[in-house]
Amino acid sequence: MAISLKKGSTFNLTKKEPALKKILIGLGWDVKPGNSLDLDSSVFMLNASGKLPEDGYFVFYNNLNSPDGSIKHTGDNRTGSGDDDDEMILANLDAINASIQEILITVSIHDAEARRHNFGMLADAYIRILDVETKREILRYDLDAEYPTNTDVEFGRLRRENNEWIFVASGIGANKGLQGYVDAYA
Ligand SMILES: [Ca+2]
Ligand SMILES: [Ca+2]
């Protein structure tokens, strides 16, 4: 049974799952009837200064692989229709470049401003982390209805601390769009 995280809580992946090497970060969403909404999952791999060491460490629908080969986005999903994970990001924890201290996971609505979209149109959204080898769900974090007017959210962070990986369920809603995160971390 997966652990369900609450906003702000943390989970020590290395301590709780010492055998874990490869993880799948799955994003799922559905929309309320009559709506259509394109969510995009992205990761920013940050160095000790909290910045991208180079542009390639921003992994998203237009850059599916990180330069160190550790992170792979499996591709854009534009509707969220269907069950289970609609967008997936694979991470090989041991292959992550040693300079990377934090992996920031964001979820943003594509073209939200022009389309007047917001999270209030979502019926459900979650992020979960699975063990790639066993397919076992390790933890899950539901994005509940507390961000109805937001268009993007810092969903979580994987933080390297003393050679351990800690997942932080940040849950910080915003309205800056994907470009806003790029501006902050590039
Ligand atoms: Ca998408
Ligand atoms: Ca779905």
Image (spheres, helix red, strand yellow):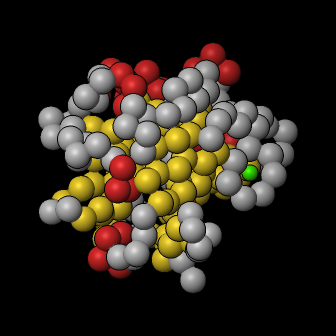
Taking the view exactly as shown, the residue that stands out farthest to the bottom is: 1
Answer above or below: position of 112 versus 89: above
Q: Residue at x 35, y 76 (%)?
A: 18
Residue 70 spot, x, y in % from top left: 42, 45
Answer above or below: position of 31 versus 176: below
Residue 181: which quarter of the image? top left
Residue 126 spot, x, y in % from top left: 58, 57
Count of labels in the image: 0
Q: Residue at x 42, y 70 (%)?
A: 20
Residue 66 spot, x, y in % from top left: 43, 34
Q: Quadrant of the N terminus?
A: bottom right
Taking the view exactly as shown, the residue that stands out farthest to the top is: 114
**178 relative to 55 in the view: left or right:** right
**37 relative to 169 in the view: left or right:** right
Residue 6: which quarter of the image? bottom left
* Residue 42 seen from this side: yes
Residue 170 spot, x, y in % from top left: 36, 54
Answer above or below: position of 183 versus 2: above
Answer above or below: position of 107 versus 93: above
**163 relative to 45 in the view: left or right:** left
Viewer-nearest residue: 140 or 76: 76
Q: Residue at x 50, y 72 (%)?
A: 138
* Residue 174 seen from this side: no
Viewer-nearest residue: 114 or 52: 52
Q: Quadrant of the C terminus?
A: top left
Q: Residue at x 49, y 60 (%)?
A: 23
